[in-house]
Image (cartoon, rainbow, N blue to C red):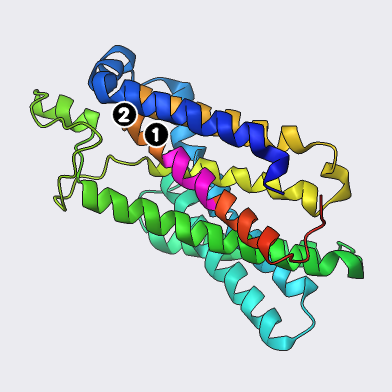
Amino acid sequence: MIKTYKKNIIGFYVIAAIALGFAAFFDLKIDILLNNPDNPVCIWFYNTGEIPCRFIMPFAGTVIFYVSDKMWKRIAGLLVNLGGSAYMGTYIAKHFFVEENQLAFGIVYGIGFGVMLLLFGRLVSVSEKLKKPLFVLAVAGIAVMVVQLSCIEGMKYLWGRVRFRDLLADGSYEAFTPWYIINGINGNKSFPSGHTAGAGMSYLLMLFPFVFNKFKDKKQLCFWIPCVYTSIVAFTRLVMGAHYLSDVTVGGIVSFSVVLLAMAILQKNDNALLKS
């Protein structure tokens, strides 16, 4: 499984290492050059960039609910669906709909979305052979999301890096620190980029060729689509003044690495995903 993407993996980490080395000297200058927070394309990706992460639990919960033969697993799937949908709904409400009663609206909207997914799931026929691989894929997706979010939030608090837009608001660059300096908990959360890491959850697509026959000959596409999408989201975060090059690079590294870790675990345990 890992061997299939060997060249892609090496290329990814080489480029990431170069980006971090470049960022050590030019992080601030790049943001000064690119800053355009009113760019409509960047605003769009600000609103939509994390959607791959937010959609994992609603879909994974629906899959678990329908492919499981044990009641406790079906109940767990239902709870994951509804809880994850509420989590997704608060994101949608914040970025697209209302300002007042945002939390309540988001939860209701999200649960409604989850219920619709469950109803739609009744129309999908899944072969017995595919049920176990789908269950494994769903559980892997949830685990990857949880680990990614934990890593990103933990690093954000620990690094305490000031965002570029906050430097502009203060009228001074004195509070800027390079990415390799850990500032400690101070309320600032620039490093690493949560949006880029959320977009990077799309790297889970790399697992699809080992589950679905339709994707078996599209392994490279399953790498490059997430790569391009995550890169676009990362670039827009620079333009928005929300992050630096090093922030988005590490955000992407975290997501990609967590997905690779999941692939390695599945491969080592010879789980129910199709072999390659």
**Is residue 252 part of the magenta span, yes or no?**
yes
Amino acid on which disc 2 is placed: Tyr
Which residue sits at x=24%, y=52%? 157
The overriding secondary structure of the stretch rendered in magenta is helix
The answer to whether 242 appears left or right of 77 in the picture is: left
> Left or right: 229 with respect to 171?
right
What percent of the width, then of the height, locates residue 140? 62, 62
Query: Residue 240, can we see it?
Result: no
- Residue positioned 81% across, 49% down in the render: 276
Q: Position of residue 38 (x, y in %)?
A: 36, 21
Label 1 sits on residue: 248
| Whether label 1 touches label 2, CB < 8 Å | yes
Residue 167 visible in the picture: yes
Residue, disc 2? 244
Relative vertical location of residue 155 with respect to residue 29 in this rendering, above or below: below
Total count of labels: 2
**For the magenta stretch, what is the residue range?**
251-258
Residue at 84%, 43% in the rendered image = 216
Of residues 218 and 267, which is closer to you in this image? 267
Label 1 to label 2: alpha-carbon separation: 7 Å
Camera-nearest residue between 97 and 32: 32
Q: Position of residue 137 (x, y in %)?
A: 70, 61
Between residue 130 and residue 182, name the one nearer to us.
Answer: 182
Q: Counting other residues with Cα less than 10 Å from the Cα at mark 1, is it few (<14), some (14-19), or many (20 or more)?
A: many
Name the amino acid type tagged 1: Val
- Corner quadrant of residue 26: top left
Residue 46 falls in image quadrant: top left
Judged left or right of residue 149, residue 172 is left
